[in-house]
Amino acid sequence: MDNATIGIKVADGSYYPIIQRPGTVRKRLVLTTVRDNQDSVQIDLYQGTGDTLADAQYIGSLMIENIIPSPQGTPEVELLIGIDKEGNLNATAGDKSTGEKQSLSVSLEA
């Protein structure tokens, strides 16, 4: 899908584009919790051609669990996301304080 973006669904339900396709690229984002004492963060990945979630297709999710209960905005979940030369999306998310990680790799080619 040329001129598409890879992005995430944020807590308010909107779409946040991270990577522009085509191309080989790697980006890093630091995400956090939206509620006090939240013990998990789900990162939903989408590919779209517009600026809204309605224009995007679901790719997959990363779930980081066992986050230490803290005030909202305190935990740091790092998301590394990239597209390799074969057109595969590679994403890894991890809680910086606990080391809890999850990875996802998907072919974006039709």
Image: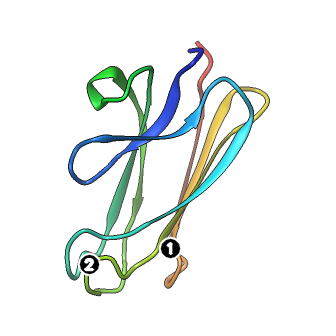
* Residue closest to the eye, 105 or 85: 85
Q: Position of residue 54 (x, y in %)?
A: 26, 24
- How packed mark 2 is, by other alpha carbons closer than 10 Å (few <14, some 14-19, many 20 or more), is few
* Left or right: 36, with 58 as reference point: left
* Residue on which the image places disc 1: 100
Q: Is residue 37 above or below residue 17?
A: below
- Colour setup of the view: rainbow
**Residue depicted at 74% across the width and 34% down the height:** 24
Circles 1 and 2: CB atoms closer than 8 Å: no
Q: Nearer the viewer, mark 1 or mark 2?
A: 2
Q: Position of residue 90 (x, y in %)?
A: 63, 43
Residue 101 placed where, x, y %? Answer: 53, 66
* Residue 31 versus residue 100 in the image, above or below: above
* Amino acid type, callout 1: Glu
Q: Give amino acid for label 2.
A: Gln
* The N terminus - image quarter: top right
Q: Which residue is mark 2?
A: 72
Place of residue 106 in the rendered image (x, y in percent of width and height, measured from the top left): 58, 34
Seen at 51% across and 29% down, the residue is: 5
| Quadrant of res 88 | top right
Whichever of labels 1 and 2 marks the residue nearer the N terminus, that label is 2
Image quadrant in which you'd find residue 21: top right
Judged left or right of residue 53, residue 79 is: right
Classify the position of the C terminus by image quarter.
Answer: top right
> Residue extending furthest right?
85
Q: Give the Cα separation between the discs numbered 1 and 2.
A: 18 Å
- Mark 2 element type: loop
Q: Nearer the viewer, residue 109 or 49?
A: 49
Which residue is drawn at the image coordinates 60% and 15% (left, top)? 2
Q: Does residue 102 appear left or right of residue 57 in this picture?
A: right
